[in-house]
Image: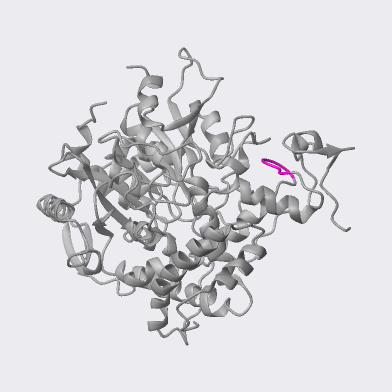
Amino acid sequence: MTIEAINKKLNAIIYFNKGVSATQSGTPIAIKDNICVKDEPTTCASKILKGFKPPYDATVIKKLKEAGFALLGKSNMDEFAFGSSCETSCYGPTRNPWDPERIPGGSSGGSASSVAAGIVPMALGSDTGGSIRQPASLCGIVGMKPTYGRVSRYGLIAFASSLDQIGPLTRSVSDSAMLLNVISGYDEMDSTSLDLPVPDFTQSLVNDVRKMKIGIPKEYFPEGGIDKEVKKAITKSKDILIALGAEPVEISLPHTEYAVSCYYIIAPAEASSNLARFDGDQYGLRKDAKNMVDMHMGTRTAGFGSEVKRRILLGTYSLSSGYYEAYYLKAMKVRTKIKDDFLNAFKLCDVILTPTTPTPAFKIGEKIDDPLKMYLSDIFTIPANLAGIPGISIPCGFTQAGLPIGLQFLAKPFDEEALIRVAYTFEQNTDFHKRKPKI
Amino acid sequence: MPNKKTIDEKTVKHVAGLSRINLSGKEVKLYQRQLTGILGYINKLNELDTKDTLPTSHPLGNLKNVFRKDSVRKSLSAEDVLKNAPAKKDGFFKVPKIIE
């Protein structure tokens, strides 16, 4: 089957780059549609950016081009990366290659689906509350969220600026390390990127976890709050690592249960402010009107989908006069507590092991009318974004129905090397990453 | 945090106006119900005492003011910047009247 035929079934790639031909050399890569590629459509899967072609490359794109990658096209996503299912795209939902009736996860669902289906060997996504790790988990591939500040966000269309981070979606841990080598590093165009040396991450592809301390947080295994098959696979994964010489350590992250609440104040607040720029003045959609306010109103009303409007309303409310201290400031303080939980835990362990998601992929349409239920599907991935720490999801099993299950590791800031080492060791001693979906 | 667990339709309309979004009557009702549910969940944060906690804005808060050197360098041309403009005139973005 050609990649176009596979893509027709999955709707994973929404735009194929005209400049890439079958004879071009270089590893093909798909780019999430919220990362600017010069003179190629970049729309955040939103009607409000239809037709927009950035006049410049994001820093990560510049690095990929210099390294000789072939940019195959743009991958589907939840509109403006607001979602966990890839259903809110203005181009329609992306499907999971393991079961086309199910969601691939989100918001980088097109990136995950296209890698899992073999349309591309790797893709870039962005992760604000789990948007790389959650779809990687549900599609049975490797997804890495680097430390906040490790990869430049210049040219990534902002969702929540204090949480967003670009990262790789790949079929193996080796590819993840290799791609991270290419995209990492300080960039003076991103004032939040950190000027630290970047190690060669492929040096951490070491099949050895002896003496490595693996923290098991009891809050990530809530009674009744996690699918039975997922729990079984995660427990088995822990045992595999122990058999390989890792040392389990029981830890506690006591503020875990507040992470989703904290996130759904901070992320929409930052988003409502970031999305103020889409008003029809300078680019994208414009609905003409006699005066400027009516033009802005008409453009935003027609251009944004319903989940985007919901988050803008929520964010504007929590930032509005009289509510700022009660909501936004309160959430920033709770964020400190969540971050401190992790820093305390890493005094006792090298990495933390958790499920990536509480359930395997759910059905298309299952949660779309219940936003709160949808938001809770990111319960295990959100805390890492609030704390700024790196995380990786790798395949660790399948349900009886054949749906992939993901295992998440978290590490202290700028210790992606520990993630790569433990993930690589697990991968080298298991076969889950070798299974491919039948399309 | 206000203990008020509901957000009324008037507030939804007010916030939509601030956000420069028009909502239909049906949408006002839908968002009123959904935002009430979400805020009810979020109110969980009230359980925590944060009197002595400092807020986190940058998660790895070890950055001080970030400045670059004040030197001239190449930037995008006006032509490139205006390429995506819905309307332009004489090298500027053209927008509808701001003041009546």
Task: Please tell me whether residue A72 belongs to the stretch shown in magenta.
Answer: no
Q: Position of residue A44 (x, y in %)?
A: 54, 42
Task: Please count the marks in the image.
Answer: 0
- Please give left or right for residue A100 compared with residue A149 in the image: left
Q: Nearer the viewer, residue A146 or A270?
A: A270
| Main SS category, magenta section | loop
- Quarter of the rendering containing residue A413: bottom left
Q: Residue at x 47, y 86 (%)?
A: B52
Answer whether residue A160 is visible to the viewer in this image: no
In the image, residue A231 above or below residue A107: below
Q: Residue at x 37, y 51 (%)?
A: A416
Q: Which image quarter holds the C terminus of chain A? A: top left
Q: Residue at x 38, y 59 (%)?
A: A375
In the image, residue A243 above or below residue A32: below
Q: Position of residue B51 (x, y in %)?
A: 47, 87
Read off the magenta span.
A282-287
